[in-house]
Image (tube, rainbow, N blue to C red):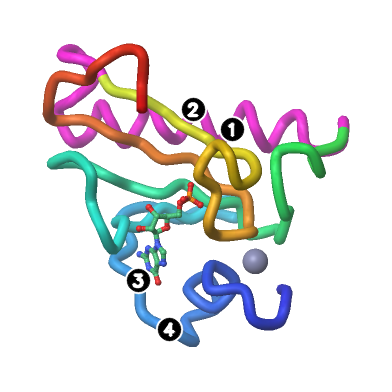
């Protein structure tokens, strides 16, 4: 738990979130400003600031996040058509919340290269 971290506050229930999945390691909730029909944020309960702050102790956690992304995509019916998992690291990539998170986007055709 980090003070003034919006995602820590959502995880603790201090501010509301539309949760669609949770377990001992991660939570997943709907993005406030969705960029696709399905836009879910998969967030570790552990406060990790950016991708650069991951350590080998987090290897299993990151693998688990991808498993959860696949499970949610499957459960919501997007797995066969396809989906995207995005992690933005630092300002130039568009990171605005400093608690690591993985965007699960699905339900529309995606363009490449991404913006
Ligand atoms: P980033 O830009 O850091 O990769 O992604 C942050 C995401 O968090 C954005 O897509 C933004 O819409 C979402 N977000 C910011 N504040 C809140 C909030 O209070 N609740 C929820 N559900 N999403 C938020
Ligand atoms: Zn946090």
Distance in Å between CA atoms under marks 3 and 2: 21 Å
Mark 1 or mark 4, which is nearer the start of the sequence?
4
Q: Quadrant of the C terminus?
A: top left
As drawn, which residue projects farthest toward the right? 56
Q: At x 50% / y 44%, what residue is drawn?
A: 94
Query: In the image, residue 66 lies at what x, y percent?
Result: 51, 28
Check if mark 4's residue and mark 3's residue have beta carbons within 8 Å: yes
For disc 3, does the CB lie below 8 Å from ligand 1? yes
Distance in Å between CA atoms under marks 2 and 1: 5 Å
Q: Give the number of the mark in front: 4 or 1.
A: 4
- Secondary structure under badge 1? helix
Check if mark 2's residue and mark 1's residue have beta carbons within 8 Å: yes
Q: Is residue 55 above or below residue 79?
A: below
- Residue assigned mark 2: 67
Whereabouts is ligand 2, in terms of quadrant? bottom right
Compared across the picture, whether 96 is left or right of 54 comes to left
Check if mark 3's residue and mark 2's residue have beta carbons within 8 Å: no
- Secondary structure under badge 2? helix
Distance in Å between CA atoms under marks 4 and 3: 7 Å
- Residue assigned mark 4: 15
Q: Residues within 10 Å of mark 4 (few under 14, many from 20)?
A: few
- Residue assigned mark 3: 17
Q: Is residue 5 above or below residue 31?
A: below
Range covered by the magenta-colored residues: 56-82
Mark 2 or mark 4, which is nearer the start of the sequence?
4
- Residue assigned mark 1: 64
Query: In the image, residue 29 lies at what x, y percent?
Result: 36, 57
- The verdict on residue 23 being magenta is no
């Amino acid at each position: 738990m980090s003070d003034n971290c919006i995602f820590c506050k959502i995880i603790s229930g201090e501010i509301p979130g539309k949760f669609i999945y949770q377990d001992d390691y991660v939570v997943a909730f709907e993005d406030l400003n969705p960029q696709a029909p399905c836009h879910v944020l998969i967030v570790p309960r552990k406060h990790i600031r950016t991708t650069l702050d991951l350590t080998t102790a987090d290897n299993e956690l990151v693998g688990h996040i991808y498993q959860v992304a696949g499970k949610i995509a499957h459960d919501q019916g997007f797995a066969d058509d396809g989906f995207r998992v995005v992690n933005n690291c630092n300002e130039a990539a568009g990171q605005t919340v400093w608690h690591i998170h993985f965007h699960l986007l699905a339900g529309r055709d995606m363009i490449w290269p991404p913006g």
